[in-house]
Every structure is written in C-alpha cells, then in structure tokens.
Amino acid sequence: GEVVTWGFYGFGGDSSAVADRLAAGVTSIVPTDMAFAALKEAGEVVTWGFYGFGGDSSAVADRLAAGVTSIVGTDKAYAALKEAGEVVTWGFYGFGGDSSAVADRLAAGVT
C-alpha cells in the first residue's frame, strides 16, 4: 500500500524526502518515539522522521535495500531481520541502534 503522513515534521509527520518510495508496495510500518520504518513487499526498508531515533538509516541503507523479512523497534532504535538470518540495527546507540559489539553473532542464523 501507500503511506500518507501528517503531524509534526520532525517526528515523522513529513515523509516528503522518501514519498516516492512510499507510494506503493508498503506492507507494514513500525514506529519509534520520533521516526518510522516501512517494510516493502520486496524486503526494502524506508525510514523517515528524527534521524537520531532511526529516521536516518543511511549508515546501513545498503543492507536494508532488499531481503528484510521483519522489523522491530524500541523507543529509539530498530532491528531488521533478513532472509538469511542477519540482523541489522540502526538508531540511538544506547537503545539498541549500535550492535557492533555483537555483530559477529548477528551476521547469520538468527531466527
């Protein structure tokens, strides 16, 4: 489906920067306190809202371009599960957005 947003621009109310990617094919939307992540049919993740709480996924964008099967969010971060069992995280580091300390354990085989 299509995503339509409204509300305070800094908290996800303005998705104009990614509106073309939200025009069709969205299957689910997951919020944090101030951002949103949309999962598309082909496994792409599109994010918008406050950059520090997951609205900016540019650091992991290449890993979110395809193959994601599900997304979960905390108050300020996200984790995405990919088809091969890899977990990708982004958002506020103190709330789970930085999984670099356990990256080797999240690279594959997670169910």
Image (cartoon, rainbow, N blue to C red):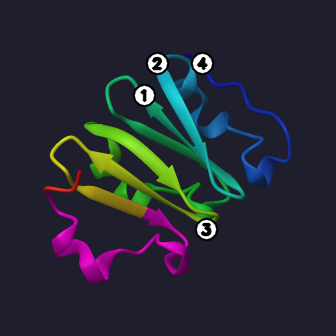
Say above or below: 61 vs 66. below
Q: Residues within 10 Å of mark 2 (few under 14, many from 20)?
A: some
**Left or right: where 25 falls relative to 66:** right
Total label count?
4
**Dot 3 and dot 1 residues touching (CB under 8 Å):** no
Query: Amino acid under label 4?
Result: Glu
Read off the residue under disc 1: 40
**Dot 4 and dot 2 residues touching (CB under 8 Å):** no
Q: Position of residue 98 (x, y in %)?
A: 41, 75
Read off the residue under disc 4: 2
Q: Nearer the viewer, residue 69 or 34?
A: 69
Q: Disc 3 or disc 1, which is closer to the eye?
A: 1
Mark 2 and mark 3 lie on one chain; the one further toward the N terminus is 2
Tell me the distance, in whole angstroms, between the alpha carbons under discs 4 and 2: 7 Å
Query: Amino acid under label 1?
Result: Lys
Tell me the distance, in whole angstroms, between the alpha carbons under discs 4 and 1: 10 Å
Q: Secondary structure at mark 1?
A: strand
Q: Is residue 18 magenta?
A: no
Mark 4 and mark 1 lie on one chain; the one further toward the N terminus is 4
Say above or below: 70 vs 97. above
The label shown at residue 20 is none
Read off the residue under disc 3: 52
For image coordinates 34% across by 46% down, the residue present is: 64
**Dot 1 and dot 2 residues touching (CB under 8 Å):** yes
For image coordinates 85% across by 41% down, the residue present is: 7
Query: Amino acid under label 2?
Result: Gly
Mark 4 and mark 3 lie on one chain; the one further toward the N terminus is 4
Residues in magenta, as a range = 90-108
**Left or right: where 26 falls relative to 60:** right
Read off the residue under disc 2: 25
**Dot 2 and dot 3 residues touching (CB under 8 Å):** no
